[in-house]
Image (cartoon, helix red, strand yellow):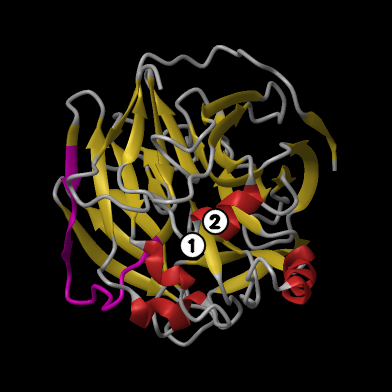
Amino acid sequence: MEACRLAGTGDGVIGSEDIHFRPDGVAFISSDDKSYWETEMFRNFSARVPHAKVQGNIFTYDPATDKLQKLRHTGDSFPRDFHPHGISIVPRTGFEHAKLSKVTTVFAVNHRRDGDAVEVFEATPDALKHVKTVKSSIWKNINDVAAAEGGFYVTNYIERVPYTHPLAVPELINLQVEIGAGGYVLWCRLDANEGEEACTKVLEGLRMPNGVEVSTDGKQVFVLESLGQRVVSYNIPPEGHGARLVPYKTLRFGAACDNLSLSPSGRVYTACHPKALTFKFLHAKKPSKFRSPSQVFSFDQSLSHLRQELLSADGNPLSGSSGAAFHGSTLLVGGIYDPGFMVCSGRSEEPSSIHGESGPE
């Protein structure tokens, strides 16, 4: 595609699930070879981890210098299994409701054989130092995380992962029932004592909640429902984090979208699967043989002014887009299974195609 190219394919980046920019324009990218996802499909992701071929990584990328850096794993407590999914960083672009710090804190959803966890790291220019592991008896299969003051929001998008062969119609029906309204969002405190439950449900009854992000002013939470093909903004009540979130407004996409990120101007970006069945039942099984289109939407925090950009109608050069982030004039896009990530330069945030349905929840 014009002004877009693949990067990182020869540097070990694969399955670049989620991307966030730091205010200085350096992006953090989660990377994991997710071929193990297609094993033992009757079981949760944590049960599939023993089939993983390699450990996952966090990379940084600076569009200004084109420098890509794999962060070394450091710290005595660094987890034995590291398979990052959604990530969040502090400080990050578009999120002003955080204390400025010279240290970048990275939060990463991690699929481990002993159950999903959120890992907390301190990042230096070339290393990732493990600081803390947060686990919960409440969640089952977590997906994305959004850091805020004193803790983080995390999405649990499915209670159980059923087998979903394209011909297994009964299982497809079960899948619809299972995740039709079975997803939820939790708030987790960072100051919980050892052995104390750190997390509490703040939303329930969601249709495959996936991406999550906090508004620029820290007063709202955006939750994207992949199966519901929508994003909903929720007000954080006066009691603060940990209280039940209050639905405010909804924006519908007409596509199964994934992670969320903020640009410096405060626009929200998401990458989507315009052909979800092609992605799930073909591309996910054989990514190099069956390609799946990649699409990016952005919208303002009032959930209006939706902009759509079809990056690759045939799934090339990047298939199955899952994360998108914008800074300066550069759009970065990652995919769930593909090697590398896409760098699209010379971009602007001026609205081009405006459509979509929005309204109060």
Q: Residue at x 73, y 38 (%)?
A: 254
Residue 165 against residue 347 in the figure, above or below: below
Residue at the disc numbered 1: 285
Q: Determine the image quadrant of residue 272.
A: top right
| Residue at the image position 25 percent from the left and 37 percent from the top | 61
**Residue 134 location (% of width, % of height):** 43, 73
Amino acid type at mark 2: Leu
Q: Nearer the viewer, residue 167 or 156?
A: 167
Crowding at mark 2 (Cα within 10 Å: few <14, some 14-19, many 20+): some
Q: Identify the residue position indicated by label 2 in the image.
A: 282
User: Is label 1 in a helix, a strand or a loop?
Assistant: loop
The quadrant where residue 80 appears: bottom left
Above or below, comparing residue 7 to residue 279 in the picture: above
Amino acid type shown at disc 1: Lys
Q: Are marks 1 and 2 in contact (CB under 8 Å)?
A: yes
Q: Residues within 10 Å of mark 1 (few under 14, many from 20)?
A: some
Does any portion of residue 189 appear in the rendered image?
A: yes
Q: Split into 4 quadrants, where in the image is the N terminus?
A: top left
Q: Position of residue 13 (x, y in %)?
A: 26, 50
Where residue 146 sits in the image (x, y, percent)?
51, 52
Relative to residue 288, is residue 94 drawn left or right?
right
Q: Is residue 272 left or right of residue 284?
A: right
Residue at position x 46%, y 43% from top?
A: 319
Q: Residue 167: give x, y in percent of width and height.
A: 69, 69
In the image, residue 118 sits, relative to residue 57, either above or below, namely below
Q: Residue at x 35, y 82 (%)?
A: 50
Q: Which residues are magenta?
A: 68-84
* Image quadrant where one finds the C terminus: top right
Q: In this orientation, does residue 103 appear?
A: no
Q: From the viewer's side, name the closer residue of 310 and 261.
A: 310
Q: Circle 2 — which element?
A: helix
